[in-house]
Image (cartoon, rainbow, N blue to C red):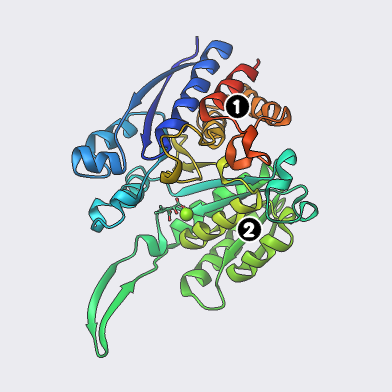
Amino acid sequence: MAETKKIAVIAGDGIGPEVVAEAEKVLKRSEELFGYSFELSHGLFGGIAIDQKGTPLPQETLDLCKGADAVLLGAVGGPKWDDNPKELRPETGLLGIRKALGLFSNIRPAVVFDCLKDASTLKPEVLEGTDLIVVRELTGGIYFGDKFRRDGANGQEAVDTCVYNVSEVERIVRQAFEIARTRRKKLASVDKANVLETSRLWRETVNRIAPEYPDVELEHVLVDNCAMQLLRRPSSFDVIVTENMFGDILSDEAAMLTGSIGMLSSASLGEGSFGLYEPVHGSAPDIAGQGIANPIATILSVALMFRLTFGYADAADSIERAVKNVLDAGHRTGDIAVDRSKAIGTKAMGDLIVAAMTR
Ligand code: IPM
Ligand code: MG
């Protein structure tokens, strides 16, 4: 029997609990098939935590995460909390947990599944072979810089500051080079060095580190150009590394290449093997409680957890194979169905994937 791994499960709001329930079935099946052992503990996070505890990130949830080997997160947010003041917004909890757990690196793969090529708004021939990863810096930049209002000569002004120091850039860039090494060995570093000082420091740092990775082909791409190239030649990208806000925007764009945000998993990592894993999609309040959400992104987040935190490649392969087989057999949830009348629900999709898992 393998050592028991502790997983903190924070399902959150909207469809979060529905998709996480399916991912938990996959965890259980992985124990049966591969002899792994997981201890799950559940915590409140996001809107539900605001309602029940008066804060989006209760201390006990943070402690639960800190005591775990990995965190599985569903989704947070919803219209109910949209007009709340900043400290009582689910998004504040999300930024808080990233910072408190030191998760400076956000990894978002965007893979075009062959059988879903037609689900994208882009032409299939443009998408052919697209398999890229956005590595986004997650605990610095304009998200975390000083923010304030002040009285200016012409009335009220608002200020958001963007700060990066060399070590923050170094650690994320090194991680991106390392990831590129395990893939097609191409790294695109994205910045706005023609305008921003933080970007010039970013680029200098990348260039200083690059000689340590002579096997990786490096290109610098300005962020506006990158937004364009992602639509023009998506398959030519392998790993993209960029700062927090550019990464936020580009990873949404990359997700749309696949046509199905309901399919995309993500990992947020720090220095060690600890990681937080979540689907890229949000809490989808419009379909919450109906049992129709696509659980695949969350299920694939478990595969990513197995690979990156636990080193359980056999079980990760098993999950990814099962997802592919179920899709190849034509099963679809509503979000990826061509014929919506034939779409299956969240539980049915989860059950099919669990049944398709093999050693
Ligand atoms: C994301 C989201 C968050 C972000 C929001 C909800 C704060 O868009 O994870 O990409 O901007 O980081
Ligand atoms: Mg985003």
User: In front here: 221 or 338?
Assistant: 338
Q: Position of residue 154 (x, y in %)?
A: 27, 89
Q: Secondary structure at mark 2?
A: helix
Q: Which mark is residue 210?
A: 2
Q: Position of residue 91 (x, y in %)?
A: 34, 51
Q: Amino acid at mark 1?
A: Ala
Q: Is mark 1 within 8 Å of ligand 1?
A: no
Of labels 1 and 2, the one closer to you: 1
The residue that appears at 70% across and 55% down in the rendered structure is: 237
| Side (left or right) of 168 relative to 30 | left
Mark 1 vs mark 2, CA separation in Å: 31 Å
User: In which quarter of the view is residue 224 placed?
Assistant: bottom right
Q: Amino acid at mark 2?
A: Ala
Residue placed furthest toward the left:
54
User: In which quarter of the view is residue 241 placed?
Assistant: bottom right
Q: Residues within 10 Å of mark 2 (few under 14, many from 20)?
A: some
The residue that appears at 64% across and 49% down in the rendered structure is: 259
Q: Is residue 49 above or below residue 23?
A: below
Residue 72 shows in the view: yes
User: In front here: 71 or 76?
Assistant: 76
User: In front here: 200 or 224?
Assistant: 224
| Side (left or right) of 206 relative to 187 | left
The reply to whether discs 1 and 2 touch (Cβ–Cβ < 8 Å) is no
Location of mark 1 (residue): 316
The residue that appears at 31% across and 52% down in the rendered structure is: 92
The residue that appears at 45% across and 41% down in the rendered structure is: 287
Q: Which mark is residue 174?
A: none
User: In which quarter of the view is residue 187 placed?
Assistant: bottom right
Q: Residues within 10 Å of mark 1 (few under 14, many from 20)?
A: many
Q: Secondary structure at mark 1?
A: helix
Quarter of the image with the C terminus in it: top right
Q: Position of residue 201 (x, y in %)?
A: 50, 69
